[in-house]
Image: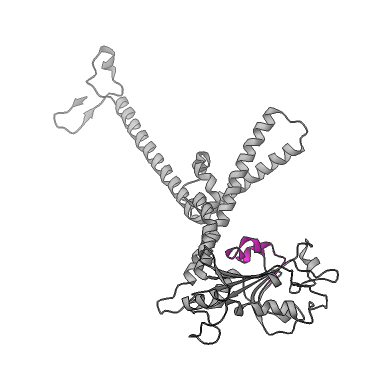
Amino acid sequence: MKTYRTRNGFTIPKENEDNLFGLNNIISFQEIEENISLIIENEYDTFVKDAKAKNIRFIKDYIKVKAPRYNSFLKNESILQSIPPNLSEDKLEEFLYKISYEARKEIDKNIQSFIDNKTINEKAISEIINDIRDKTAYDVDSLADYMTRRKAILQLFDKFLDADEKGTYKLEEDIHNIIFPLGLTNGDLEYENHNLWLLDERFISYKFIASDKPITSYSQIKSSKEIDLLLIDNSIYTEPEQMFDNPISFGDKNSGDVNSLVIFEFKRPGDIAYQKRKTDFTWEFSDLIEPYFDKFLYESVKKNWKGNQVNVKETTPKFGFIIVDNIPEQLVRYNRNKGWKATPFGTYFKMTPETNLHIEVMTFRKLLEFSTSRHAPFFDKLFK
């Protein structure tokens, strides 16, 4: 490179011709361009890699926190790399859903093709095993989404059991509505719109469920009593409309035998369960719920609203559950002396063999604890 005495210019050769003679102290435009290109390439490559890594972190955080239904994507690098950067959460959700939908559709198509194909060979078996593995991953994603909802319901239930800053507790009806909306039956709402699983998973399959409805609304029994939650099982019939002439009655003209009867009674959080006076603890837990069973068992007219017989017998399995906020020791002592037993789980129960009646008493906190414990293995596996 040649410099001028006035230092107002440079003479730079386009190419380093001196290199031909072993002289490499002259810098050419060719070398400058090559080095600048290399620097820009390295800087751009670093920028692109950083941007891609940042985008993948954003996607993973979104899936882990807000969309566990796409958990299987977390370990699929090709899918993560294919998602464009700078998407809003709404657009990202659309993109992820499209990928999931197309993949599930393709897997189902492959599995059906395997079933329909009469030619089975080693290659086909190998391919279908991979499809089944992928399908299992997507099914786990669906389970994660479902469990996320349940986890939120458990957290809400827990919150409802606490008093607010004014010391006010939620009403009994608020707790009730989380489990099963007041004044409705299972004919009025879909499976996903109630949370009977909080009580026990087994009750989800019961054919008739009524919540806080007068007994007269689903039978001809004359009573003003409103059961908090009534569940009736009749496994003889597979279709609800065969068992019920309308969504809030039970039995039919051929057979009204009830296989089991379950009644829940809830008491408001923050209140101590009492019958006569707040200072009177000389009453049995069963006083809160047994009169409901007596109506079904001993009422002279035991028909549904259309006049069909309803058969609740002494031998019919009957289960009563009483859920309260607090069980005072004085009340426990009185009931122990009346034949109530403590369970290892902190609840109390009594059985009446003559009428095949089992009643259990627990607190709301115990109910929440039991439900949370049942879900713990799923939560630990899906959200660890």
Q: Quadrant of the N terminus?
A: top left
Q: Residue at x 70, y 42 (%)?
A: 109
Q: Residue 114: x percent and y percent?
A: 72, 37
Given residues 18 and 120, the one toward you in this image is 120
Is residue 188 at least partly visible in the picture? Answer: no
Colouring method of the image: one colour
Q: Viewed as shown, does residue 280 lie left or right of 41?
A: right
Given residues 249 and 353, the one toward you in this image is 353
Q: Residue 269: x percent and y percent?
A: 50, 76
Q: Quadrant of residue 350?
A: bottom right
Given residues 303 and 299, the one toward you in this image is 299
Q: Quadrant of residue 105?
A: top right
Is residue 59 at least partly visible in the picture? Answer: yes
Q: Residue furthest top?
A: 21
Residue 191 part of the magenta-drawn span: yes
Q: Which residues are magenta?
A: 188-210
Q: Viewed as shown, does residue 315 lie left or right of 45?
A: right
Q: Viewed as shown, does residue 259 lie left or right of 181?
A: right
Q: Residue furthest right?
A: 254
Is residue 96 positioned above or below 175 on the image? Answer: above
Given residues 332 and 67, the one toward you in this image is 332
Q: Residue 335: x percent and y percent?
A: 55, 76
Q: Residue furthest bottom?
A: 277
| Number of numbered discs overlaid on the protein picture | 0
Q: Residue at x 40, y 39 (%)?
A: 49
Q: Residue 142: x percent and y percent?
A: 59, 52
